[in-house]
Amino acid sequence: MNAPQTPHTLHFMPSAGFRARSKNVVENPFLRQSFRGAMDFLMSKRAAQFPDAEELESLRSLGERIRQYNLAKLPDLLLRLEDKLTGNGIQVHWAETPEEANEIILGICHKHSAKLMVKGKSMVSEEIELNHAAEAAGVGALESDMGEYIVQLANEKPSHIIMPAIHKTKEEIASLFAEKVEGVDYTDNVDALIQIGRTVLRQKFLEADIGLSGVNFAVAETGTLCLVENEGNGRMCTTAPPVHIAITGIEKIVEKLEHVPPLYSLLTRSATGQNISTYFNMISGPRKPGEKDGPGEVHLVLLDNGRSQAYADEQLRKTLQCIRCGACMNHCPVYTRIGGHAYGTTYPGPIGKIVSPHMLGLEATAGLVTASSLCGACGEVCPVKIPIPDLLVRLREEAFSEPKANPAMRGQGAGHNGLISNIWRGWAMVYRSPTMYRAVSWLTSRFNWLTPSKQGAWTSVRVPLKPAPKRLRDMLAERR
Amino acid sequence: MSARDRILAKLRANSPSTAGELPDVASWYAGHRPVESAADKAQRFRHFIELAHAEVYRVSRDGWLQKLWEVLSARHIDKLLVSRDTPHGERALAELPQSGIACQAYTQAIESWKAELFHHIPASLTGARGAIAETGTLILWPDEREPRLMSLVPPLHIVLLDASRIHNTFYEAMTTEGWQDGLPTNALLISGPSKTADIQQTLAYGAHGPKELVVLMIEEDLQ
Amino acid sequence: MTRTPPNQTPPRDVYFFATCVVDQFFPGAGMDAITLLERQGLRVHFPEQQTCCGQPAYTSGFPDEARKVAAHQLTLFPNDWPVVVPSGSCAGMMKHHYPTLFASDPARKAQADALSGRIYELTQFLVEVLNFKPEDCGSDCTVVLHTSCSARREMNVHVTGRQLLGDLAKVTVAQQDHESECCGFGGTFSVKQPEISGAMVEDKVKALKATSAERVVSADCGCLMNILGHAAWKDQQEGRTQPALPGEHIASFLLRRTSKETAR
């Protein structure tokens, strides 16, 4: 098993207090209604993209197979990717931790005396809190995806991995722009708001020294970085500034170019219900001699940040199959009730619950893994068939079991509670023994009038549970 | 040990012994995508890219310039960015100025005229390498003749497409053309004008890239 | 998923695994399920030694405790008869999770695999094995069906309950908003995350009530405990003496509708 890594703590959103934050949202009828509407919209868009259940199932199976195949070859493929990218003129960097990744990126910025970095949408850059690190290093980091731009203006974090500003209404955005963007009057016309963003950010694309982006698929055989987007800001970031830095988790790799089309199709259809995104941007090198635009330098930062820990365990490795479509959160009844911020992690929703423990440790995320009714909606829609409910059950075991000498993951046992464990031990003693079970259930039914009227959290919105005066087995005995 | 070595060592220590057989992508596509005539493919391409808010005009091999002029005139655009080194760019350069449209060729490296491109070029004309019927997608491989930013920065992007180069699927395009043997520095799929739904899931066009995408589709000689 | 086709020669004997919730909280539903099966000419065997499938510990992250309890249930069904379970989630536990729970215990793994193939959720058994077509003896009524997430996504039997209700000539099955969404029970989830669970059951009960159905039926007593528990609490809060949303197990409803003396 691997050694625990340097703990990484998110600066802006403490993982503690999940229950309090979710309570705040749940008790706000406006937010409840707004999340519900947004998720209903995304669910129906996705459903419309998959009219043929048989095609969907076979495509999901293919997607799962592709991801598992490539993960199985991950170390070899990383080397091939590095080799091929280097041959293409792209510089490859490796980072074990968010701190190392920030250091690499800001090192490149300093080398170019960069003042402004424009950013395409990158959840990995959120994961390493690059904006925070850049600011501290005196480099301006400006989000250029419309949703990310809005969230950054509001000094917030994305609440959804695909639609970062899904928690905001157009009226809130209108007020935000009127307050924060120079020379802008209040308008809640969406087209007008987008044109304001366009105008502001065009100037920044023109001025920026560095463009930063994420990566959706990195192709080993061709040395190609693939980016999926609708707005064109990703293309701006990777084309207009003199230097392009891409950052990705080490798992986003495929061996063959032909692995891309099925995954890409699953991604856009699952995420936003589009048959394809507006742009698919395949970058295989910096500007060549004779070419008139494109960055002179292209860098790729490969980030581990706990992924190798998930990789080490056959079951937990499935976490890394994820292609970040967000369909699990769109279909999650918990996400729908509380939105993305309540989670307190970069990646919210079901995927966040299974990936964050590897990044932040179970000590920071043990509460999150209990926040699921295991209804299975996430696993049902996952385009690469990640068994999210099974992984949540596994993470609960890792969180609540007694601390072990060689844990499979950081923070194993962090949620261990001797009393709770003893309750379950007692429960098992009763239910493994028919004699004890009969005795206990006889007592609870005969003395059901002793059932307390307050049963902790259960009775906060429900009447108490009361055993029936006669058990089924008593009724059967009487019938004979 | 470097971060690279540590990461690789951790992964190697726990890699499964076998990855199994290569996923059979080919047979999935063989079983799930119809074979269509060139005319059907052109029709399907048109259907999907129009759904994505692009305009498509059917043109002849000789007549596309007339349609290009009409598209520009209807928008009162009198300036067009073209390539000096492509046949269509040359033709536009040669013929459009007489009809009141100034053509600017992309001849200099971007550094010398970035601000001008961003602020003063209302439209551009490029070719397309091909297209994809299934999704209504243009395939562009920008190069020294038609650089990357031509299809991104001007608010109106006009694309000349030969309908005989429409593939059924993205998979078919890359495999029949052998993309795995080498890709250009930048290859693009474009499926409509730039858009966003980041504000309250309301679709708005012209986020950062072109606000309008016009396809002039040459539909001659299709079986 | 392997499915037994509607059988030409239905089994003569079945085991009935009641589940701990039915035994202690919904014994009437258990009796009704047994009566329904017996009416089809089956001998129903209730292993006296049965307790719980082990799911509460399993989903809470205590697999060792779940294994101990599950291991005991493995011994209860020696004959090669179907095991009928009046609960989708407990059936799902026994059918799909027992084999993985005993993955590293070859002897028990073999038992679990063998048992897994014999596990049937009640409505699934009625439809797929018995080809049961209930004959409606009651008068017009509208009900709404809640299907548990396990029945829907793990057992893939959400169609069988609907089919049985659909076969009742005078019964209209109302369609609720967000039908496939979880009711918020989720075992210990309901007490570990009471705010979220509470919001989910609140929305579920609202959606069920909005159909104006006269009752909710479900093949899962866990969901019923949650849904009816909240509905009754709401009745108390709003000072109602009659339940705004009565409900019962689908077995009870089916039995009553198909019995001339009790049909209503």
Image (cartoon, coloured by chain):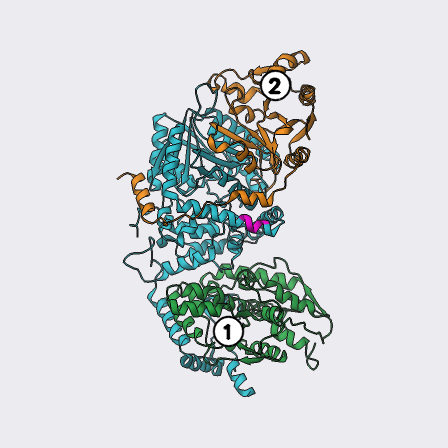
Quarter of the figure with residue B212 = top right
Counting other residues with Cα less than 10 Å from the Cα at mark 2, is it few (<14), some (14-19), or many (20 or more)?
Answer: some
Q: Which chain is green?
A: C
Q: Colour of chain A?
A: cyan
**Closest to the observer, B173 or A340:** B173
Is residue A426 placed above or below A143 in the rendered structure? below
Is residue C144 placed above or below A60 in the rendered structure? below
Residue A466 point in image, percent of width and height: 51, 76
Is residue B198 placed above or below C134 in the rendered structure? above
Q: Secondary structure at mark 1?
A: helix
- Which region is colored magenta? A55-59
**Closest to the observer, C238 or A386:** A386
Chain at tag 1: C
Residue matched to label 1? C21
Give, as a three-letter code, the residue at label 2: His
Q: Are marks 1 and 2 in contact (CB under 8 Å)?
A: no
Residue matched to label 2? B88
B41 relative position to B86: left or right: right
**Closest to the observer, B207 or C11:** C11
